[in-house]
Image: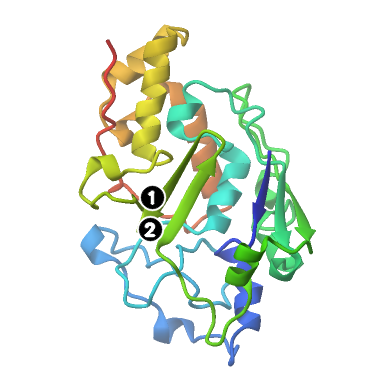
């Protein structure tokens, strides 16, 4: 599988580009401007993850960039998620119940040439960067292993409608709350992460690629096909929440790969234990 990104993945793989774009690239004093711990979330011993701030700190886990006045979040950057996916595959917990991860790894990440920083990508993703401790690592016969992808670049000009969005504008690019999810099988428009025409509080507003809808889709496959092993059906019958699903024995190998990767390479990763929901699946 191959992936194209019109922009550098946020987080560690884009820090050199962030530094180059600063009027003053002087490193920030760490102690003087370090954010306070998130005491309200019960993690007073852990500092808040940085977005683009403290850009002189390289190789660390960062959160997705946002406005300076936005509430703290534990949503990890694209760089960190891609780094982890080199070990846990592109499968999520629900789909890992049905599909072996052996051939579910990203093979190539293609970036626009102007958005590629060789030192940053080597540090974020490469065998000689922060992922070095996992070089050659394999988790038994589970299919999970450290499988680094290669980085490619392209100078090809995107279609006119897209290139206008990517061209530099005075004051920098302006973010948009609209997005489109398209495949040969469906197309949907999202506004602030919710399907167009739906309210934030409406469960029907969840995107077809959201974790909640994915859980429901996997449950439908299990109920309709009648082919997965019995223990998969038992997982669905015994779990009602997303976190409970992730802690089942059938996903032990995936969990081990994730824990080991974080412990050895992404050491300031903070687990988001509050991110839970009812899966909504029912099997006849």
Q: Nearer the viewer, residue 192 or 142?
A: 192
Residue 76: x and y in percent read 46, 57
Q: Which residue is mark 2?
A: 74
Q: Sequence-wise, which precedes: disc 2 or disc 1?
A: 2
User: Which residue occupies the extreme bottom position in the image?
Assistant: 24
Residue labelled with disc 1: 271
Q: Secondary structure at mark 1?
A: loop
Identified at 39% across, 27% down, the residue is: 217
Q: Specify the quadrant of the image occupied by residue 257.
A: top right
Quadrant of res 165: bottom right
Q: Camera-side residue: 74 or 130?
A: 74
Label 2, secondary structure: give it. Answer: loop
Which label sits in the foreground, 2 or 1?
A: 2
How much space separates mark 2 and mark 1, taking CA atoms? 8 Å
Count of numbered marks: 2
Position in image of residue 167 (x %, y %): 63, 75
In which quadrant will I find the N terminus? top right
């Amino acid at each position: 599988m191959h992936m194209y990104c019109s922009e550098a993945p946020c987080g560690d793989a884009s820090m050199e580009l962030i530094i180059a774009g600063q009027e003053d690239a002087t490193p920030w004093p760490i102690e003087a401007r370090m954010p306070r711990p998130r005491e309200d979330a019960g993690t007073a011993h852990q500092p808040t993850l940085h977005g683009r701030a403290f850009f002189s700190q390289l190789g660390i886990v960062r959160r997705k960039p946002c406005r300076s006045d936005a509430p703290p979040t534990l949503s990890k950057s694209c760089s960190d998620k891609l780094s982890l996916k080199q070990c846990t595959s592109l499968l999520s917990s629900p789909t890992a119940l049905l599909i072996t991860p052996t051939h579910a790894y990203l093979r190539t990440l293609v970036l626009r040439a102007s958005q590629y920083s060789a030192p940053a990508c080597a540090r974020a993703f490469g065998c000689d960067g922060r992922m070095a401790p996992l070089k050659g690592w394999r988790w038994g016969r589970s299919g999970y292993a450290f499988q680094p992808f290669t980085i490619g670049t392209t100078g090809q000009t995107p279609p006119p409608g897209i290139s206008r969005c990517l061209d530099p504008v005075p004051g920098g690019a302006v973010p948009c709350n609209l997005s489109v999810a398209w495949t040969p099988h469906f197309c949907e428009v999202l506004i602030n992460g919710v399907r167009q025409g739906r309210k934030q509080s409406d469960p029907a507003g969840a995107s077809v690629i959201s974790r909640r809808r994915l859980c429901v889709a996997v449950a439908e496959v299990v109920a309709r096909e009648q082919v997965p092993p019995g223990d998969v059906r038992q997982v669905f019958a015994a779990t009602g929440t997303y976190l409970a699903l992730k802690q089942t024995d059938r996903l032990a190998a995936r969990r081990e790969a994730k824990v080991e990767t974080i412990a050895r390479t992404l050491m300031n990763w903070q687990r988001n234990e509050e991110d839970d929901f009812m899966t909504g699946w029912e099997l006849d």
